[in-house]
Amino acid sequence: MKNFLFVLTLAYLIVLATACGNNNAEPNTDVVEIQHADDQVVISKEQFDHSQMAFGNLVQKELPVTIPSGGYLEVTPGNRATVSVYYGGFVTKLAMIPGDVVRRGELLFEIENPDFIQMQQDYIHAKENLAVLKAAYERQQLLLKRNISAKKNFLAAESQYKSTLAVYNGSRKRLELLGISLAAVEAGKFTSRVAVNAPIAGTVTEVNVTLGAFLTMADIAMEIINTTALHLELSVFEKDILKLKPGQPVTFFLPSEPEKKFTAVVHLINNKIDDTKRTVLIHCDLLEEKNQHMLLPGMYVEAAISVDEKVRNILPENAVISVEDKHFVLIQVASTANKYTFKQLPVVPGHRANGFIEILDLPELLTNNSKVVTEGAYNIIINE
């Protein structure tokens, strides 16, 4: 069996500094003691406290098995809207800037076009003629039924009536789409301006128009996003697909704020694999969070999907010391009035989650009663 040399570097430096500062001081030979044969290190209790080291115990606790993932915050298609116009016109009023919060139906901007007046005239002309043409059509229909009038007279009346009816219905629908009041038009109050209102409630994220600009039907004037309807889109490798199912909890955070955790739940698993990345898209619903105002569409997040929970033997992650491909814990095997004696114990780590690590194949000396160094273990550097 290989022997390991334990050196408490911090303690050594303190002893060295003390010796250099006071040539007359007696060297402190009680701070660190090396025992090669038993892979042990002896530390004074004073040094233990000075290094802010701490003890803990092995416990049995539910530890979730998680799948690491990454993705972006997005909004569903129904909560993102681009605003265009049904008919081109010059922008005469602009009521919003990026960042403004709007209600559905609230004014965004106004456009003006002389053609709007012609549309209203066409509507009134068709409406006025429609009553006369309908009466003529019904009269010719009655005369034809009694064989009093020729059929061609009926067909001519029918054609005029139905073509005018089509113009009337088309003009009426066009004005409704533009938001022009039919009651005002029928009262003779024509307008060359129309208002463009918000199709959804949300936040204005883009404004692509300026006063005086001519806006066509192909132009996107504004974009509105309902940021209260965020969801999480995560990419998971195909090897983990069979472990996933709707309802599993998800913990995620922003890389810039890793200490602030947010929660979500798996809602939907896409059934298409990305041919290039070999990943599947997972849709997750965000749970109510007090810090959700920090989240914006397009933000990248790192996440962990909990796929299984069972009781495991666990220790705090800081208790396990990793040296190359080997892992150790330090347990107290003896103590005196002013010293602790620790033994290096090789362990096999398992799953990690929430700051804890599973210990597989428990060594005989590692039990629930063992006093394990859970803080400050990395102050001890292990060399062969």
Image (cartoon, helix red, strand yellow):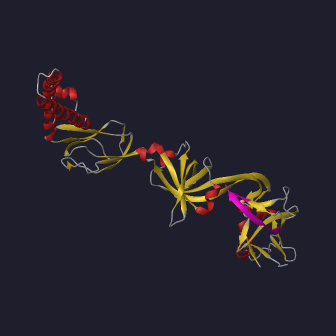
Looking at the picture, how far across and down is residue 310, in whole percent? 74, 52
Is residue 149 within the magenta segment?
no
Q: Is residue 279 above or below residue 177?
A: below
Q: Quadrant of the C terminus?
A: bottom right
Residue 118 visible? The answer is yes
Q: Is residue 252 left or right of residue 203?
A: right
Mainly helix, strand or loop, the magenta region?
strand
Q: Nearer the viewer, residue 47 or 147?
A: 147
Q: Residue at x 38, y 44 (%)?
A: 203
Looking at the picture, how far across and down is residue 11, in whole percent? 74, 70
Q: Residue at x 17, y 21 (%)?
A: 142
Q: How many marks?
A: 0
Looking at the picture, how far across and down is residue 336, in whole percent? 88, 62
Q: Which residues are magenta?
A: 343-357
Q: Quadrant of residue 33?
A: bottom right
Looking at the picture, how far across and down is residue 116, in whole percent? 16, 38
Q: Nearer the viewer, residue 194 or 134?
A: 134
Q: Is residue 109 above or below residue 56?
A: above
Is residue 349 within the magenta segment?
yes
Q: Is residue 93 left or right of residue 227?
A: left
Residue 188 visible? The answer is no
Q: Residue at x 14, y 36 (%)?
A: 117
Q: Nearer the viewer, residue 52 or 55?
A: 55
Q: Quadrant of residue 241?
A: bottom right
Q: Quadrant of the N terminus?
A: bottom right
Q: Is residue 199 above or below residue 147?
A: below
Q: Is residue 369 left or right of residue 230?
A: right
